[in-house]
Amino acid sequence: MDFRLLRYFVAVAEELHLARAAQRLGIEQSPLSRAMRELENQLGVQLFDRSTRLTRLTWAGQVFLGECRRVEATVDQALRSAKAAAQGYQGHLRIALCDSMVQPRIATLLARSREDEPELEIRVFELPFA
């Protein structure tokens, strides 16, 4: 399945208006309408209830919209991860602590690190005091 169709579907489902969705996507309304019919044919389900005055999602369309949003989020995450990896980002930080370290400062540092790099995996190990 073409990822483009999923993006188009999300725009139409959110706008519930082909002309506005087409404008949002920067394409003409006619190809967008054909793309939605093609998607419905590929899936074998009706995603929209269409009338001359109103476009609504069917139950299948509502379920499909939720799944499409998850797919978009996963693809976005994959793109971010690939770009980060290309720049040398490893994605994890290991910290060893001993009992004598000041805990409030460490907690603040870890919280700040989580805010700055939400995708960073942080592992904290406690070392016995020697």
Image: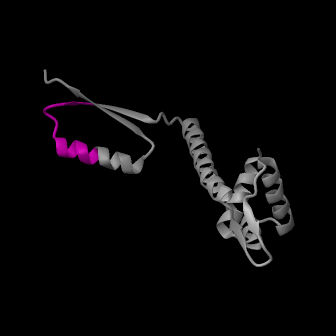
Based on the picture, tell me whether residue 75 belongs to the magenta stretch.
no
The spot of residue 112 in percent (x, y) is 33, 49
Q: In the rendered view, tell whether residue 92 sits above or below residue 57.
A: above
Q: Residue at x 63, y 59 (%)?
A: 62
Quadrant, the C terminus: top left
The spot of residue 63 in percent (x, y) is 62, 54
The spot of residue 61 in percent (x, y) is 68, 58
Q: Quadrant of residue 54 in the image? A: bottom right
Q: Quadrant of residue 110 in the image? A: top left
The spot of residue 89 in percent (x, y) is 50, 37
60 or 107, nearer to the observer: 60
Q: In the rendered view, tell whether residue 123 sits above or below residue 52.
A: above
105 or 55, nearer to the observer: 55
Q: Residue at x 69, y 68 (%)?
A: 56
The residue furthest bottom is 53
Quadrant, the N terminus: top right
Q: How many marks?
A: 0
Based on the picture, tell me whether residue 104 belongs to the magenta stretch.
yes
Q: In the rendered view, tell whether residue 20 sits above or below residue 13.
A: below
The residue furthest top is 130
Q: Residue at x 68, y 62 (%)?
A: 58
Tell me the magenta residue range: 96-109
39 or 63, nearer to the observer: 63
Q: How is the image coloured?
A: one colour
Q: Residue at x 25, y 48 (%)?
A: 108
Q: Is residue 129 left or right of residue 24?
A: left
